[in-house]
Each structure stands twice: as C-alpha cells, then as structure tokens.
Image (cartoon, rainbow, N blue to C red):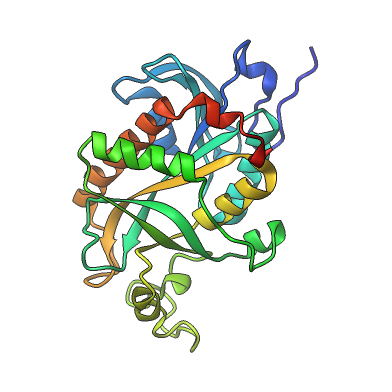
Amino acid sequence: MQNDALYHIGFGKKDLGQSPPRIALLSGDPERARHIAQETDGVTFEKNLSENRGLNSYLARLPNGRRFISATSGMGAPSLSIVVNELYQVGVRVIIRVGTSGSIQSDVKMGSVVITRAALCRQGAADDIAPKEYPAAANPFLTMALVNAARELKTDWHIGVTASVDTFFEGQERSESSANKHLLRQIHGMTDEYRALGILNFEMEAGTLFKMGNVYGFAAACVCGIIADRAQSEEPDLEAKQRAVHDAIHVALRAAETFDDEYMQLRYWR
C-alpha cells in the first residue's frame, strides 16, 4: 500500500487501523501530548504515530475503549490550522484543545480551569478561514461535556469568553517580561478593556479552532489550565501550572469518554 502519510502530521489513515479514532486532544506542548497518551491514569497507550517536525502524535484508548489521538498543535493559530486541517483529513471529527492560559478576572484563580464557550478572535489565521464577523463559537454539546466532566471531577472551573490572540507578549499586553517595552497605542489598556467586557482569559489558539470547526464541520471545544494571574504578574506560576494542567487533562479525557456518539452524527456540522 502506498504511504498516505500527510506532510505535516506525518501519518495517514492507514496508520490508524481498522477502527480509526474520531476524537483528538490537541496540546500546544509536545510533552503534554506525550504525557496524555503515555502517562495518564486510565489511558492505554497504543503507539507513536509520528514525531514529524516536532508535531508529535500518539494513538491511545480511553477507559471505555474509545480510541483517540493525542496530538501537538504547536504554538499559535497558524501551526494549529495546519495540524487541524490534516487531522480532519484522516477522519477526526471531534477536537478538544487542552491548553494553558492567563486569567484577567480576579475570580478566575491560578490552578483553576477555564472552559471556553466562545472566543474574541484577534487572529490572522482565522481570517483566512472565515470573515472577522464570523462567530468563533465552540460546539455546545462538546462544551457541555467538558462542563459535566469538570463538575463530576470537582475541579475548580469557569466557563465564558476567551480572548484568542496571535502573540504571547505584545498581543497580551506584556511589556515587563518582554524584550519589547514599547507597545503600540492600540494595545495599551487592552487588558482592562477586555476585563470590562467580561472576558476571562488570554490564549492563542481557540478562536481559530472554533472557526475551523464550524466551517469544516467538526465539533471543537477548549479547556485551559490557568497558570498566570495577569492582575498580579505577567509571569506563569509553575506550581499552579502543574495542578491546572493536570485538571485540564482529566476534564478533557472525561469529556472525550462521555461525549455521546449521537452528536458525532449530527449533520448540522456536516
């Protein structure tokens, strides 16, 4: 059989076996993708799919036997858009982003998780997918699966709107920890403005993922561990990160396990 591996993710449909997975968990950090597949309680590791271009992908099974892909998106929306496009080509129809994030609301504490129901999308990659006005909204059924998982696991969780931006430093109004101390005028005061709009957190991928989901026809959702309190500091807290990432992973895995097969067949997302 001719190799059908896709150029960027480095694997194809034939690598997924007789019962190819429909669900993928997507992490920016390749180590997180590996950890989910190989070192998480209840998950059965099957095999490495690829470590092509640093976009590591693994095949694994949930406790109920449902197979899934744990994959790396890389950092930012342009890289994510490539990986998601190719995951869709190999048959994935449900994608949960498992990320990290900084809170901009005082009640969203470090160590908690945020489930994103929609994103304020300030991302160039998303503009290539759909117009700026096109809503960057998560799949409601998959989002509720994340909420139910967080409640079941008694995680400290929040649900709301996320700001998805293209850059870690300038785009999130970081100047103290950045080499660039001279932010554009349009950036100054942005965090306060977003806080007043009720936005919970900053991250760099969800908005583009959501637009792709609605345009391509797959279910997309996002859960992020809160590792920084932007009202206090620009720097991540490594102790909070360990707890928050652990909880985000387990919420995502439980949602992937319990997400109803019936919703994967709904034609409104093709």
For the C terminus, the image quarter is top right
- From the top left corner, tell me how far across and down residue 123 is, in percent: 58, 64
**Quarter-wise, where is residue 32 in the image?**
top left
Q: Nearer the viewer, residue 136 or 186?
A: 136
**What residue sits 56% from the left and 40% below the top?**
219
Q: Is residue 161 left or right of residue 5?
A: left
Q: Residue at x 56, y 50 (%)?
A: 209
The residue located at (41%, 61%) in the rendering is 161
Seen from this angle, which residue lies furthest right? Answer: 2
Give the total of numbered labels.
0
Out of 140 and 181, give the one closest to the viewer.
140
Q: Please give left or right for residue 149 compared with residue 187 in the image.
A: left
- Residue found at x 19% / y 49%: 239
Residue 146 sits above or below residue 50 on the image: below
Q: Is residue 10 visible?
A: yes
Is residue 97 at least partly visible in the picture? Answer: no
Which percent across, then down, holds residue 234?
30, 69
Return the x and y of residue 92 as percentages of the image width and height: 61, 31
Relative to 132, say whether 147 is above or below.
above
Q: Quadrant of the N terminus?
A: top right
When the figure is inspected, residue 236 is found, relative to residue 182, above or below; the finding is above
Where residue 202 sits in the image (x, y, percent)? 40, 63
